[in-house]
């Protein structure tokens, strides 16, 4: 099992290019099951989750090829398998996104409950509610879910919570349904818009993505297309925090700044200087950042996927900073690991108070999930001595060569394997 070792590093300087978005690429890969011709994808991040999703597609009968790094060619013209293997579903929550495409294209799908990071309850009830509204019959049996319908029919679906995954799954199911589907209280994330743009390229009729009401008019079939994945706003935010926490000066390239507004606002509140230039954001840190408060919310609010990284940053802010986590109930597992390094953090229910600045000291810490792992790397950049981050398979699920990119900015970071 690999480990990532981080030593106290100088202020990061230079430029770093952000990869394509993991959270946009995964639903788009699932949506490739809907196309009957070749689909060419660009800016695909090289991540473990992407490889697992490609295995899922291949297990269902899709042909997947890798012409070069960052590119995929997928053809699902011969799709006929509706049952996804348990061992693949168990690796990653996003694998459940194949349910909508399989149900609408083949009329039947059988899935086991998905795996993924243990950051709290993420029920699939909203997904199933949407499928039922479209006319599917669903059976649940000891962790297996079977859904079938001769032909899905458009309907009005109201989501009790603007779930990203449910919005995506219902969108994909509706594009081949008969008539019009209206999703109300839909998620508004940029990844929803990217999926909508991709589906439209294939020939789907989707309107309103990015707002709370999405309308889909079903079509007979979808074809092929070439499409480029949007930049990863969470990876971009992580590098922005890396610049801020080290008091550095970093140009983060391949960024859509409108996706970054909540993170930019909080860094500026802390005293950092941010400069936008086209598809780049320059972050200049400050020696003594001010205290800040972060409250996670569905988009366009502050993303829960950046909460852990900002918690690490708050250990260097003067005074008492606060984090309020409203999205997942179990997303403070990184706090105990930061406390091992000397962070002074108090948790009450879904609120964490971070007292700073703290002098952190290197320790052996464990990544409990993807974003917690990133936060521990950030803390390691400023901690005295050496920090060893274990369970880095979580980090590899969402960051494309994070240690190489940080090293390019001057960080003292490297990866070791058990053999080493």
Image (cartoon, grey):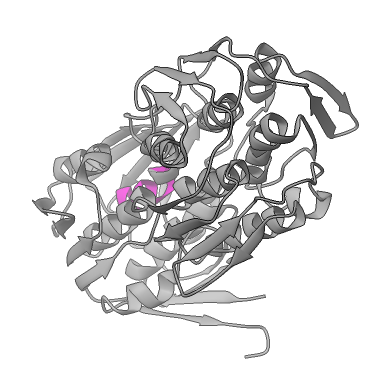
Residue 139 sits in which quadrant?
A: top right
| Magenta residues (range) | 307-315
Q: Quadrant of the N terminus?
A: bottom right
Q: Where is residue 70 in the image (x, y as percent from the top left)?
A: 44, 67
13 up-or-down from 47: above or below:
below
94 up-or-down from 231: above or below:
above
Which residue is most to the bottom?
Answer: 420
Q: Position of residue 180 (x, y in %)?
A: 52, 13
Give the main secondary structure, helix, strand or loop, of the magenta stretch.
helix
Residue 241 sits in which quadrant?
A: bottom left
Q: Where is residue 418 in the image (x, y as percent from the top left)?
A: 67, 83
Q: In the shown orientation, is residue 165 left or right of residue 323?
A: right
Q: In the shown orientation, is residue 3 left or right of residue 408?
A: right
Q: In the shown orientation, is residue 241 left or right of residue 80?
A: left
Q: In the shown orientation, is residue 114 left or right of residue 14?
A: right
User: Which residue occupies the foreground of this view, 321 or 60?
Assistant: 60
Q: In which quarter of the image is the C terminus?
A: bottom right
419 up-or-down from 258: above or below:
below
Q: Which residue is drawn at 57% across and 44% down?
A: 35
Q: Can residue 334 be seen in this view?
A: yes
Is 369 contained in the magenta span? no
User: Which residue occupies the foreground of this view, 76 or 330?
Assistant: 76
Q: Where is residue 228 in the image (x, y as percent from the top left)?
A: 37, 54
Is 310 contained in the magenta span? yes
- How many discs mark residues in the rendered view? 0
Residue 251 sits in which quadrant?
A: bottom left
Q: Is residue 8 visible?
A: no
């Amino acid at each position: 099992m690999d480990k990532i070792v981080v030593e106290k590093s100088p202020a990061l300087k230079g430029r770093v290019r952000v990869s394509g978005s993991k959270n946009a690429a995964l639903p788009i890969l699932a949506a490739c099951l809907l196309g009957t011709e070749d689909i060419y994808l660009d800016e695909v991040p090289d991540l473990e989750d992407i490889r697992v999703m490609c295995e899922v597609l291949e297990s269902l009968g899709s042909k997947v090829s890798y012409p070069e790094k960052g590119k995929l060619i997928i053809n699902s013209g011969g799709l006929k398998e509706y049952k996804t293997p348990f061992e693949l579903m168990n690796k990653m929550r996003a694998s459940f996104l194949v349910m909508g495409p399989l149900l609408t294209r083949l009329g039947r799908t059988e899935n086991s409950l998905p795996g993924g990071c243990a950051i709290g309850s993420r029920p699939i009830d909203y997904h199933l509610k949407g499928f039922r509204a479209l006319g599917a019959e669903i059976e649940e049996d000891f962790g297996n879910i079977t859904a079938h319908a001769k032909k899905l029919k458009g309907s009005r679906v109201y989501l009790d919570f603007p779930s990203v995954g449910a919005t995506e799954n219902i969108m994909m199911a509706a594009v081949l349904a008969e008539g019009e589907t209206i999703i109300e209280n839909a998620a508004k994330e940029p990844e929803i818009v990217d999926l909508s743009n991709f589906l439209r390229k294939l020939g789907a009729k989707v309107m309103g993505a990015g707002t709370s009401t999405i309308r889909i008019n079903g079509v007979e079939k979808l074809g092929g297309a070439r499409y480029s994945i949007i930049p990863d706003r969470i990876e971009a935010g992580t590098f922005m925090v890396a610049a801020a926490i080290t008091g550095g000066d970093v140009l983060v390239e391949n960024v859509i700044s409108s996706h970054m507004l909540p993170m930019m606002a909080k860094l500026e509140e802390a005293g950092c200087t941010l400069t936008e230039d086209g598809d780049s954001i320059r972050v200049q840190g400050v020696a003594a950042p001010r205290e800040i408060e972060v409250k996670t919310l569905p988009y366009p609010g502050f993303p829960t996927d950046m909460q852990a990284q900002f918690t690490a940053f708050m250990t260097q802010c003067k005074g008492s900073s606060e984090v309020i986590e409203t999205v997942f109930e179990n997303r403070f597992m990184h706090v105990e690991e930061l406390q091992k390094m000397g962070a002074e953090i108090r948790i009450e229910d879904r609120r964490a108070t971070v007292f700073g600045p703290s002098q952190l000291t290197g320790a052996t810490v464990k990544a409990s999930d993807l974003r917690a792992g990133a936060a521990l790397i950030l803390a390691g950049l400023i901690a005295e001595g050496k920090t060893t981050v274990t369970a880095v398979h979580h980090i590899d699920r969402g960051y494309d060569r994070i240690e190489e990119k940080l090293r390019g900015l001057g960080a003292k970071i490297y990866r070791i394997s058990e053999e080493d």
